[in-house]
Amino acid sequence: MNNSKSSSALSTPRFCNTGTFMRMPRMNDVDNPDFVIFGIPFDTASSYRSGARFGPSGIRSISAMMKPNNVIMGVNILEELKGADYGDVNVTPGYILPTYDAIERELQPIVDAGIIPIGLGGDHSVTLAEMRAVAKKYGPLSMVHFDSHADINDEVFGQKYNHGTPFRRSIEEGIVDPSRSIQIGMRGSLYDPNEHRIAEDELGYRLIPAHKVFDMGFDAVVKEIKDRVGNHPVFLTFDIDFVDPAYAPGTGTPEVGGFTSRETLSLLRALKDLNFVAFDVVEVAPAYDHGEITSYMAANICFEYISMLALKKKERTL
Ligand code: MN
Ligand code: MN
């Protein structure tokens, strides 16, 4: 297949020619794509269940189900945008520093070319390296972070780089501006009862835990995200454990009391006006999944990302 469109399931069955996201062409076959999907199959930094190394292949496999029209957003992603699948970053299992180097090295030319990267994790440690590459082009980023965990530990198992530490490191490295960033959906039992307070008072983030999201209502939360971020370049990072394990069981550290798939998708759609420069979805562990529902949720999250980009393009050209 040597064009910029996915093949239509009306002419070729969607279980044929799988292996790329939505059966999109490989990156080498597309000139100047608007966005690329790339996998980061690394799960060495998981603190409990590993298996997110199979996240990218799980998400790509079920993404064959996706069709190009986002009816609610009123946009056909393949008519507005050229997309491609980069394949996977050449990670080093068991070794986080060489993996970080590989992520930065492989992502940088994509980002520098003005292409929007959409990363498929991998555990959440990978986001730090993605952010390094993205911040090199755009400067300190706004982070919109959906997760049931704040991921702001200083160390886990005595290690600075772990899936529980990236959003403290990102501030230390100056690649995220906490005053323009927000964390949403945190919940579950904690070692440090002050963790959410630390995120706000010591690190300078705004953090809205899950129970407060339900108290405030979704419209108020969306307004707070928009006010916080403004028109600043945004990295949206989505840990699949934001979604309730009833809807997304295939993940390393699930927390009950979360969000439905419908609530999640409408939250994302409401952010369509933000100035997104990068996205990822992380922590999908297919071995703990049932009926591929977690992978399918992640594929749909990516579809909403792409739809937001497509809508912007459409509105620009109208
Ligand atoms: Mn996380
Ligand atoms: Mn998490």
Image (cartoon, grey):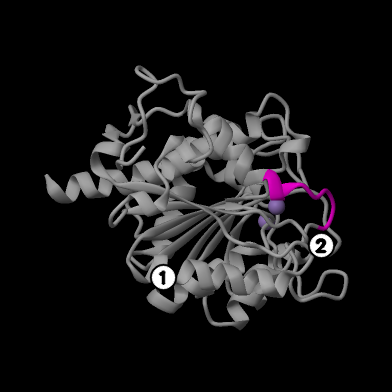
- What label does residue 109 carry, if any? 1
Q: Earlier in the sequence, mark 1 or mark 2?
A: 1
> What amino acid type is highlighted by mark number 2?
Pro
Circle 2 sits on which residue?
193
Give how far apart the Cα atoms at labels 1 and 2 are. 42 Å
Q: Quadrant of the C terminus?
A: top left
Pointer 1: residues within 10 angstroms few (<14), some, or many (20+)? few
Answer yes or no: is residue 139 visible: no
Task: Identify the residue at horizontal 76%, vertical 43% (top origin).
Answer: 254
Task: Identify the residue at horizontal 58%, vertical 39% (top origin).
Answer: 59
Magenta segment range?
47-54
Task: Identify the residue at horizontal 45%, vertical 19% (top origin).
Answer: 13
User: In the depicted view, which residue is nearer to us: 318 or 55?
Assistant: 55
Q: Quadrant of the N terminus?
A: top left
The image position of residue 311, as x and y in percent, is: 27, 43
User: In the depicted view, which residue is nearer to us: 102 or 199?
Assistant: 102
> What amino acid type is highlighted by mark number 1?
Pro
Specify the quarter for ligand 1: bottom right
The quarter holding residue 201 reads bottom right
Q: Is residue 67 above or below residue 172?
A: above
The image position of residue 315, as x and y in percent, is: 19, 46
